[in-house]
Image (cartoon, rainbow, N blue to C red):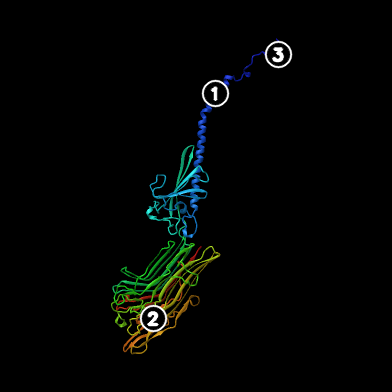
Amino acid sequence: MCRWRRALWRRPGPRDSGFTLIEVIVALSLISIAATGSVPLLVTALRSAVTSRLNTQAKNLAQQRLESMRDLEYHVDRQNGPFIDLLDVYYTDLTTTPTTRTRANEIEVGQWVSGGAAAPAPSGPFYQVKIAQLPDDQRFSQTIDTQFLNTVGAALPASSFTGYTSQTEGHDQPPSSIVGVTLITTWTDHGVSHSYTTYTRITDGRGLTSSLTSQAEGEFLRVSSTGSTGNALTVDVAAAKASGGMSTGSVASADVYALQANDATGTDYLGATGVATSPTGGNSQHSPASAFNANGSGGCGWVGVGPTQVSDVTAATTNGLPQVPSDVDTASPPVHQVAAQLTTQSNGPCGIFGFSNQSTSFAANLMLSSNTPLVEIENDAQNNVAASGSAWVNATSASTATHSVTSGASASSIERLELFPGASFTDGHGLVGIQLTRATIACSAAASSGSVTNSATGSWSVTVDYWKATDSAGHGQRVTLSAYTWNSATDTGSADPLAALDPASIVVYQNGTTTLHLSDYIASWGTTRSILESPSSGLHQLAGIVSVTTQPVRDGDIVSALGLQLGLLSCVADDER
């Protein structure tokens, strides 16, 4: 056989062998069996990855919500304007009916829960906000439960903030400066509901730093002494206080009383009074129907007063600016001020104001009547305002290039204040007479281009008269001195006008061997001719424009002396806006 045929019919060797059809089928079957077993594992892995991604996304959404809550101011007073704070959204009010609102492209349903909700909601009362679909990913929903906490982290009971609502001026003050927030983020994955819950606390970390402060007080007279049984006596006549402030919000108040007398036993005697506050707008007044005499010895009692009244006792926080009274004007000083006043009446033996220190009798050498007050304001039949104390505060908007805070007080009288009107040798009009015709103080803080200029000014006018002996037969006459005036702008630091009047050198009575000097009645007196300033508080004072200390009026009893301060004025104005 030829060579090529032998090669053609030669049997194939091992190197020429391949896979048979059966082998291929078997191999494919094994691969199919193996793949079928690994598919569930692959599906489980894919689902775990999706769940993990959703969990992470839920945590991120929760964190975004908490950060957005912290970005809001904790609280801004409602009267300051249309500002949205944390409580406006997440603790709106105490309404249990669900309320729907749209904010930042999300629909929120809020309602108050009085307590008893199931976990993970907090125990105790809370406000709940629900968002069914978050704008960033509509697969997720959130529930935010917010509750007020006390200083140790416990939930405040609802009874401690009855009437609270963040939407009403005067009722929006939060009962605490810390809230607890329970945040639940919920989603559904392949028909199974999942949730992620987190808890945090948010506090009002800004404190109460004032950006605006204004205070003023004007009082006509303060008299103090000690009664015969050792009890301290104090009487304040025609006093008015005004104050305003701004920190997270604005407040303004007025407190006015025409007469307030008290002793060591705690007994108070009141003339007309008035109180006003803002933003609540509260206003209350008390006005006695007639004159009264406090219990005590003497026909006039230890303190007595005629008709009293208060006027324009109002307060406002208009556009967030504290103003007292609410109609305060920009005149200097303002025409409208909160005021306390004594009014005149028909003639009577005790005047429209009288004070004695509960003594049944006085030192014999003073020749004083036991039925006549030691201090008295004269009567007048014309029904006029006899004595007044007033105050005011004001501010202008910080949105202007130049803005300011101002405050001030005034005191005045058309009648004389008489000391020792019961001295038997005088004309019945007092051994010494003092009339505070006018007194004012004003404080200002003016801000412009980031710089604040503070100033305080004051002025007053006083007339003094006294009884002086003219011979040795018990006769005398009244000496009226020229009006003393002072103005801080031109006369600060000048000499005391009463310093030249030495009570020891003035003979008030002389008859035979009996000689009395003014120093037998007056221990010291003087005037305030500078505005005292407290650097720490910014308080400016004219503390007793005329001050008098008498000698003791009871034999051997040094505490029976009287202290008088006529015209007590003060003010504060600070603008840090």
What residue is disc 3 on? 4
Q: Is residue 213 left or right of residue 428?
A: right
Q: Is residue 565 above or below residue 30?
A: below
In this rendering, which labeled residue sits more in front, label 3 or label 2?
A: 2
For the residue marked with disc 1, what is the amino acid? Answer: Ser
- Under circle 3, the secondary element is helix
- Under circle 2, the secondary element is strand
Q: Residue 366 location, x and y as percent?
A: 32, 82
What residue is disc 2 on? 433
Crowdedness near tag 2: few (<14), some (14–19) or many (≥20) residues, C-alpha within 10 Å: many
Which residue is depicted at the point 70% across and 13% down?
A: 4
Tell me which numbered mark, 1 or 3, is placed earlier along the sequence.
Answer: 3
For the residue marked with disc 2, what is the amino acid? Answer: Gly
- Residue 81: mark in rendering: none
Question: From the image, which quarter does the N terminus lie in?
Answer: top right
**Marks 1 and 3, how far apart in space?**
43 Å
Tell me which numbered mark, 3 or 2, is placed earlier along the sequence.
Answer: 3
Callout 3 touching callout 2 (CB < 8 Å) = no
